[in-house]
Amino acid sequence: MGPFRGLHHVAVICSDYQRSRAFYTETLGLTVLAENFRADRQSWKLDLALPDGTQIELFSFPDAPVRPSRPEAQGLRHLAFAVDDVAAVKRILEAQGVAVEDIRIDPYTDRKFTFFADPDGLPLELYQQASPPTA
């Protein structure tokens, strides 16, 4: 094994800080660790945590260019969140007005997954993790 212990964080740049802050904290329920306005950059930096300790850094920058999502461009493709029940989380998101694609089955892992988008169109995935072993 190499020296990498896991994924620490992913950075996301948004177009409307307040809208994206509400989406990630209220709609997705991520925990705020720190929130700072960096006056020298006219930029917000919001540190968010998932239950496993992985973090998302949400940034705002004035006049940031739009990220190409369709057709798919080179670079980071999407962020995937591990969930216990894709269908249940899909229903929760849809009840909050989030458009979620139909659930599909990964042909290689046999796991359920689906996609939705953040307020700027960044593709986000729900990926069903393995069922815990039964005793």
Image: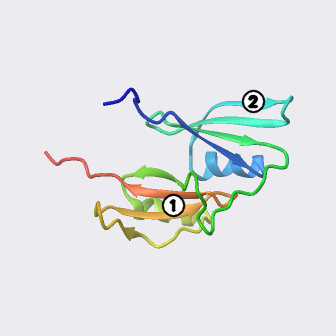
Q: What x and y, as percent, mark residue 101?
A: 51, 71
Residue 49 against residue 63 in the figure, above or below: above
Q: Circle 1 is placed at which residue position? A: 92
Out of 135 and 38, give the one closest to the viewer.
38
Amino acid on which disc 1 is placed: Ile
The residue tagged with tag 2: helix, strand or loop?
strand
Amino acid on which disc 2 is placed: Asn
From this viewpoint, which residue is outermost toward the bottom? 102
Q: What x and y, as percent, mark residue 111?
A: 32, 61
Residue 31 against residue 134 in the figure, above or below: above
130 with respect to 12 (left or right): left
Q: Circle 2 is placed at which residue position? A: 36
Q: Contact, CB < 8 Å: mark 1 with mark 2?
A: no
Q: Residue at x 55, y 63 (%)?
A: 116
The residue tagged with tag 1: helix, strand or loop?
helix
Q: Quadrant of residue 127?
A: bottom left
57 with respect to 103 (left or right): right
Q: Quadrant of residue 66?
A: bottom right
In the rendered structure, which disc, 1 or 2, sits on the residue that comes first in sequence?
Answer: 2
Q: What x and y, as percent, mark residue 3?
A: 39, 26
Mark 1 or 2: in front is 2
Q: Quadrant of the C terminus?
A: top left
> Gap between marks 1 and 2, in whole Å?
30 Å
Q: Residue at x 34, y 52 (%)?
A: 129
